[in-house]
Image (cartoon, grey):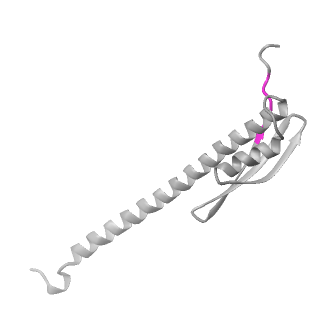
Amino acid sequence: MRSNEQTGSGSILGFGIIAVVLAIMSLGLGVSTENLAIARLQTQSDNAALAAEDVLRGLAIGYPCETAEQIVKGFGGTLESCHIVKFDIYISVSQQVMGIVHRVHVRAAPGLDSTR
């Protein structure tokens, strides 16, 4: 025999479970979006450092740090620092995505020449 006090308690429990599952899925989506933003920033910063390194080696014209800054500004980032040590270029880039500031540090150096 049913008591009148527990009528509809299964529906409330079901809605609660659905709400918890949706909250976990939303959290997972947010984390994966942030990871994707960091990966994109890292890749674009790598490209900027490689372009600057090409300029430093004389394969392209211009100034290395200015070249890196132009590329970084092209994808909406901010070049925080650019250092040249011998033939190595170190750059730090930041970008704000969804209110969170991401920072990456990149190093580009000439590889070993395979013709030697």
Q: Residue at x 73, y 52 (%)?
A: 93
Residue sticking out furthest to the right = 86
State the quadrant of the C terminus.
top right
Q: Position of residue 85 (x, y in %)?
A: 89, 40
Most foreground residue, 31 or 77: 77
Classify residue 50 as left or right of residue 16.
Answer: right
Q: Residue furthest left?
A: 1
Q: Position of residue 9 (x, y in %)?
A: 23, 77
- Which residue is nearer to you in this view: 82 or 102? 82
Q: Quadrant of residue 14?
A: bottom left
Q: Residue at x 60, y 65 (%)?
A: 99
1 left or right of 41 in image: left
Q: How many marks?
A: 0
Residue 1 on the magenta segment = no
Rendered position, 100 above or below 1: above
Image quarter of the N terminus:
bottom left
- Residue at screen point 79% across, 23% down: 112
Q: Nearer the viewer, residue 61 or 86?
A: 61
How far across and how far down the image is residue 70, in percent?
73, 47
User: Going by the picture, which residue comes out furthest to the top?
Assistant: 115
Image-quadrant location for residue 3: bottom left
Q: Is residue 14 left or right of residue 21?
A: left
For the point 66% across and 45% down, the residue is 42
Q: Is residue 72 above or below residue 116?
A: below
**Chain part drawn in magenta:** 107-112
Residue 104 place in picture, x, y as percent: 71, 50
Which sits in the foreground, 75 or 116?
75
Residue 101, placed above or below residue 68: below
Magenta stretch: dominant SS?
Answer: loop
